[in-house]
Image: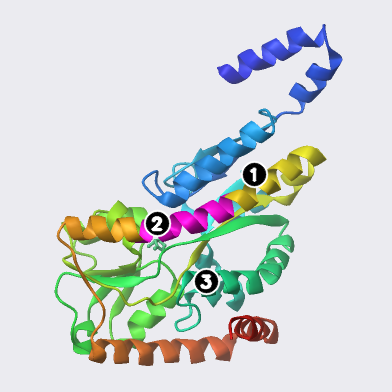
């Protein structure tokens, strides 16, 4: 309603001032689809980004964030932005693993184990990721990490044999592969489907962050979190290039500046959430501990296998990115 009334106002003003009418007529309304719910720090950050853009452009670019997969399901977000059905989207980047080994980089064990390393890895991989998106008529705006990934179980995980036959909920391909390497049975499940997966007995365990554990009330289904620091995966926020090109230069610039701020804010929010969520898990009765030697050994072996598997599939460009990253972090 507001939209139409402000448009009506713009038309009225047009008789008085052509300049106002021209700028209002150009105002763009975008939709941004994300699979993650309002309880996620990612969604909070994305909503703040939309607000910042609205403010910086005096409403010339009005982005509505549709959270929790309410507009489009996770797997359809990128194809929809590519087609231009929606102008912008946010996804868990590693769900694109089957498109290029480059999209697996932030779900490889032993590569980036801290936020600083994860940042360097993002810097090293960004140019190629931008190219891959550009080939499909899209433009990445920014990326924000989840806290590192660990393992939730309804028992104390202290023996690698416990993985045998364990049905583990996994958010992406490499988590599934790792689970298989450990002898478990992976099931790919969207974050929002986690409660149902547990309550219907489809899974016994899950691999994810403390953040998702908190937003999905992990204490309703499991008792332990093994802080295995497997990897630090990211969400990526991107737009349809044609929609971007239709914006005037000042609006484009405002958008990119807000994106830079959203990236900085998001990385800090992730760090803060890692602490806050761990505390919330403990307050709700989850026991958090690090893997013992035997479990750590099994994880490291399963991780090595995953890495070798990646190397056998990766092209030279992807391998070169790892070398660049290693050179920068040495
Ligand atoms: N939460 C999301 C992606 C990674 C994470 O920590 C999930 O588990 O689906």
Q: Are marks 1 and 3 in contact (CB under 8 Å)?
A: no
Distance from disc 1 to disc 3, alpha carbons, whole Å, reads 31 Å
On the image, the x and y values in percent for residue 100 come to 61, 74
Q: Are marks 2 and 3 in contact (CB under 8 Å)?
A: no
On the image, the x and y values in percent for residue 36 come to 42, 50
Label whose residue precedes the other's in the sequence (1 or 2): 1
Helix, strand or loop at disc 2? helix
Please tell me whether mark 1 or mark 2 is closer to you in this view.
Answer: 2
Helix, strand or loop at disc 3? helix
Distance from disc 1 to disc 2, alpha carbons, whole Å, reads 30 Å
**Residue 272, which numbered label?**
2
Label whose residue precedes the other's in the sequence (1 or 3): 1
On the image, the x and y values in percent for residue 250 come to 79, 38
Look at the picture and state if 37 lies above or below 74: above
Q: Tell me where residue 96 sits by quadrant.
A: bottom right
Which quadrant is the N terminus positioned in?
A: top right
Q: Is residue 293 magenta?
A: no
Residue drawn at the location 57% of the way across and 43% of the way down: 49
> How many C-alpha atoms fall within 10 Å of the one at disc 2: few (<14), some, or many (≥20)?
few
Residue position marked by numbered label 3 in the rendering: 116
Give the magenta range: 262-274
Helix, strand or loop at disc 1? loop
Front position in the image: 74 or 328: 328
Residue drawn at the location 50% of the way across and 82% of the way down: 111
> How many C-alpha atoms fall within 10 Å of the one at disc 3: few (<14), some, or many (≥20)?
few
Please tell me whether mark 1 or mark 3 is closer to you in this view.
Answer: 3
Residue drawn at the location 62% of the way across and 16% of the way down: 4
**Residue 87, which numbered label?**
1
């Amino acid at each position: 309603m507001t939209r139409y009334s402000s448009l009506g106002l713009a038309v009225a003003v047009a008789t008085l001032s052509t300049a106002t009418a021209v700028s209002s007529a150009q105002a763009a309304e975008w939709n941004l689809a994300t699979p993650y719910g309002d309880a996620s720090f990612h969604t909070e950050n994305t909503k703040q980004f939309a607000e910042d853009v609205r403010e910086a452009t005096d409403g010339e670019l009005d982005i509505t964030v549709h959270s929790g997969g309410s507009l489009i399901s996770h797997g359809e977000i990128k194809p929809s932005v590519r087609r231009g059905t929606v102008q912008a989207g946010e996804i868990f980047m590693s769900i694109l693993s089957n498109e290029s080994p480059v999209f697996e980089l932030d779900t490889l064990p032993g590569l980036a184990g801290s936020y600083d390393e994860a940042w360097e890895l993002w810097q090293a991989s960004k140019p190629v990721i931008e190219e891959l998106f550009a080939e499909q008529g899209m433009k990445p705006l920014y990326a924000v990490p989840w806290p590192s990934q660990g393992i939730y179980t309804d028992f104390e995980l202290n023996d690698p044999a416990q993985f045998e036959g364990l049905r583990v909920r996994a958010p992406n391909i490499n988590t599934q592969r790792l689970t298989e390497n450990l002898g478990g049975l992976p099931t790919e499940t969207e974050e929002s489907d986690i409660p149902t997966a547990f309550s219907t007995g489809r899974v016994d365990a899950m691999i994810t962050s403390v953040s998702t554990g908190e937003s999905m009330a992990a204490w309703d289904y499991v008792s332990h979190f093994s802080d295995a620091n497997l990897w630090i995966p990211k969400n990526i926020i991107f737009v349809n290039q044609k929609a971007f090109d239709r914006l005037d230069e000042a609006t484009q610039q405002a958008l990119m500046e807000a994106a830079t701020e959203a990236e900085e804010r998001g990385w800090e929010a992730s760090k803060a959430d890692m602490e806050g969520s761990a505390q919330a898990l403990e307050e709700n009765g989850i026991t958090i501990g690090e893997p013992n030697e035997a479990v750590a050994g099994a994880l490291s072996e399963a991780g090595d296998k995953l890495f070798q598997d990646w190397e056998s599939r990766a092209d030279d460009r992807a391998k070169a990115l790892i070398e660049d990253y290693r050179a920068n972090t040495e």
